[in-house]
Amino acid sequence: MSFSLESIAQRIGGELDGPSGLEICGVAGLEDACEGELSFLARSRYRPQLHSTRASAVILKRGEEFSGPSIRVDDPYLSFLQAIELFARPVVEIFEPGIHPSAVVHTTAKLGAGVRVGPFVSVGAECEIGDDCIIGAGCVLMRGVKLAAGCLIYPRVTIREECVLGARVIVQPGAVIGSDGFGFAKRDGRYRKIPQIGNVVLEDDVEVGANTCIDRATTGRTVIAAGAKLDNLVQIAHNVRVGEHTVISAQSGISGSSKIGRHVVLAGQVGVSGHIEIGDAVQIGGKSGISGNVAEGSVISGIPARDHREWRRLNAHYGRLGRYANEIAQMRERIARLERMRDAETTENA
Amino acid sequence: MSFSLESIAQRIGGELDGPSGLEICGVAGLEDACEGELSFLARSRYRPQLHSTRASAVILKRGEEFSGPSIRVDDPYLSFLQAIELFARPVVEIFEPGIHPSAVVHTTAKLGAGVRVGPFVSVGAECEIGDDCIIGAGCVLMRGVKLAAGCLIYPRVTIREECVLGARVIVQPGAVIGSDGFGFAKRDGRYRKIPQIGNVVLEDDVEVGANTCIDRATTGRTVIAAGAKLDNLVQIAHNVRVGEHTVISAQSGISGSSKIGRHVVLAGQVGVSGHIEIGDAVQIGGKSGISGNVAEGSVISGIPARDHREWRRLNAHYGRLGRYANEIAQMRERIARLERMRDAETTENA
Amino acid sequence: MSFSLESIAQRIGGELDGPSGLEICGVAGLEDACEGELSFLARSRYRPQLHSTRASAVILKRGEEFSGPSIRVDDPYLSFLQAIELFARPVVEIFEPGIHPSAVVHTTAKLGAGVRVGPFVSVGAECEIGDDCIIGAGCVLMRGVKLAAGCLIYPRVTIREECVLGARVIVQPGAVIGSDGFGFAKRDGRYRKIPQIGNVVLEDDVEVGANTCIDRATTGRTVIAAGAKLDNLVQIAHNVRVGEHTVISAQSGISGSSKIGRHVVLAGQVGVSGHIEIGDAVQIGGKSGISGNVAEGSVISGIPARDHREWRRLNAHYGRLGRYANEIAQMRERIARLERMRDAETTENA
């Protein structure tokens, strides 16, 4: 697969600065690029690499000094993403068409048109798989699972009974949808399991990362709303709701019954306690711990989380604690000396 | 499946306040409930929902003001859990009876009565599966694995060679039992793998969460004692012992050779260092880091962990660091002024 | 399998102190050992167990007081590891030879000599599996995956398309190699997926833990360099490079495009932000959060991470914040009293 530099410039809406017929066979970062590849410069810290790269052409901001072949655009990063799309192999080419003969599909399951099912897939009773869904090798869909059209389920995913996926949901390998919520009632020092009779609903255009776990609700539904994206190794407990277009980065966890708003961004390794509400458009820094409600639009960090700027200020003070302790010790001395002089004087005057 | 409100009241030992013949077809939280469903009020913060719910009846504490159909009890939460149990579908209904023809069961493996084995399950040489065990689709039991009666192994679980599970153990999808402990000896700047020749023992009534990992011992056994419950994405390293009826919440990790007592509760994302001991009935707050032994009955939080009340006090002081820094600066000024006046006076008196 | 104590002493290069013909049938820690087993004492804190152990012989430091059968060495821990190697069952005994008839191997895949493939394995088009590789039950190798000789892939591992493994790579169960990087471009409040067209390269002698996830690069390669060891539940994002002989403990995560040096050690639950560089031989304490570049050889801890000794000092100050606050309050009083006296005197003198 290759394109001329001119045709790439046209497709990404940029201005060609170099030989129009230059053949481009791939895209890569400045450091990794080989001859024949197209690269890009988006962050000024990588500018030195612009002059050492082996890329045959570079996507640049208009005005950036560079004498080699380039495509000039307003936002080099976004334009590079468009160039990647040109070179991306369609996912359907990676999965064989049809139902693999080794797959076990229950007679009561309904499969739409164009569905691809890989080897060793198990589809349970009463499942409904929408048109053009792809189910990778080794996936297990237990009874009553429903997928709307165009879902892409990578290999070795488990979707437990009665869970429901909207259109175009993508699930990376190893994820678990619908595991039991972690619910036990303690009686006489022992834990008795509370049946988890709800399910999980992933709305349209959700993406779930590799080995991420989403627990089914105790009753009702655990919901990941439309367009939300979960990274790898994320934990979503029972009865959580994650709002539309919210992003949860790797290794973060949301405890039971908490509600995360829309357009929220959680960085990595964040923890959210149970039964709390996080408003829309909140941004949460990496490794934060959230144990109370958070107002819409807040930007927070820390354990427990605070306003991000306040967290930065307090952290600077923290770094000066040794100095503050010294100052306190010195002031104690100086005050004592003043007091001694005062006492001596008072005695003297007496 | 439905029950009359009166029969539910009888079965959960509550007092009927409403039409005895009202048919209830399900259970749900106040916000999620539909007509025909039974709900409950356990936390006063959810009281406003009591008046907007579509539930046809509600489980309430005696004395709670409410004019609609209700069942009055002492502990609405516990009573609701009993109601859930009425509506829960028996697990055996979800798994097909018998051994699926696609399963590969070694000729030397012994299977008890009533065992259910799903599609694409691999059971290795010398395995012993107790009566009424359920092994979900895609599970792999390597050679010599032993399961006592009544275990429920959800799909896509791996149990490596020689691991032993007690009676009624439940393992959620994707969990790994018996992976190699993370043991290497460094020699000449390279790591040489230390064979991990021990195993994992899960005692009776243990539950293991989705995608949780429990490493086999270097020698001897990694033990999860009877009745302990592990949530999703938990890491248990080699030679750890987790005590009876201990609860470990999601994304927590226990490093090698540490011993966790009985009836301990770890919240989410806790980390415990290696070679330490945590006493019985200890409670550990979310995201804490434990790097030393912890006495029986302690309630601790923080990184490193401290007594929980002390952690709260220190955290409050932390939030006032800016104010303390200002006070120090002001006091420094005031002391300097006092000293200047003193010096002037001393000079004057000289 | 058993050895005489004398032959073990010879093989681990120690000095026999006890009956040469004593038969040893296994190895274990002091507390776990049974009669017939060999144990060791490496940490003085475990010395009391030396006198209560049921082990038939013990590996000890020369000079350690002990009257029972022993082997005397310079480094008991390392010598014990050698003894473990004597008793470890060769991995090839655990996996059946040959290609299991249930495996689905694409006609265009090339398998080397001595390759073992377990039940329900799916090997995609154009895969190349080197000599003596072992692929456990339920693994999925998508199209174009390449494994050099001697790899050991435990059950239920997913390796996505075009990923490349060097020689002798070990992958524990449930790991995911080559999942999509978490890359989205926000446009009009929605996230649009950026195709992840790069791959993952694991160089020679890498080990990957259970349920660990390594994302493929957006373009180019995510690299785990030769001899690096990753524990369980680790997250490696797209375009990361982990250097030679670096160790990453359980539940740590590295964000996109960060470069970790050689011989680095990350303890558990560490988080590293994106686009940063960590120099060679850096050591990072458990639960640390790294948000900026780290110089070669640094030893750091904390959120955000600081020099480890400084982190310990600051932490000690933190524990005294209550005392500092009290001192500040008392000094404020004492200064005010001095000022009042000064004012009174000044007035008096006026």
Image (tube, coloured by chain):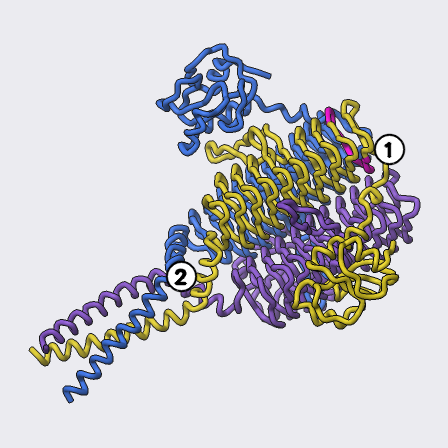
Chain colours: A purple, B yellow, C blue
Q: Is residue B132 above or below residue A11?
A: above
Percent position (x, y) of residue C268?
Answer: 53, 46
> Crowding near pointer 2: few (<14 within 10 Å), some, many (20+)?
some
Question: Marks 1 and 2: which is nearer the front?
Answer: 1
Left or right: C290 in relation to A179: left
Is the residue at mark 1 from the same chain as the one at mark 2? no
Q: Identify the residue at image location x=11%, y=74%.
A: A347
- Report the residue that reaches farthest toward the bottom: C350
Q: Identify the residue at image location x=46%, y=53%.
A: B306
- Report the residue that reaches farthest toward the right: A107
Where residue A319 is drawn, which disc sits there?
2
Q: Is residue B148 above or below residue C63?
A: below
Q: Give the range drawn in magenta.
A: B116-127
Percent position (x, y) of residue A258?
Answer: 66, 62
The C terminus of chain C lies in which quarter of the figure? bottom left
Chain name for mark 2: A
Where residue B101 is drawn, which disc sits there?
1
Under mark 2, the amino acid is Gly
Distance between the Cα atoms at labels 1 and 2?
65 Å
The N terminus of chain C lies in which quarter of the figure? top right
Left or right: C285 in relation to A128: left
Percent position (x, y) of residue B278?
Answer: 50, 43
Under tag 2, what secondary structure? helix
Q: In this view, does C234 lie above or below C57?
A: below
Under mark 1, the amino acid is Pro
Q: In this view, does C190 lie above or below B343?
A: above
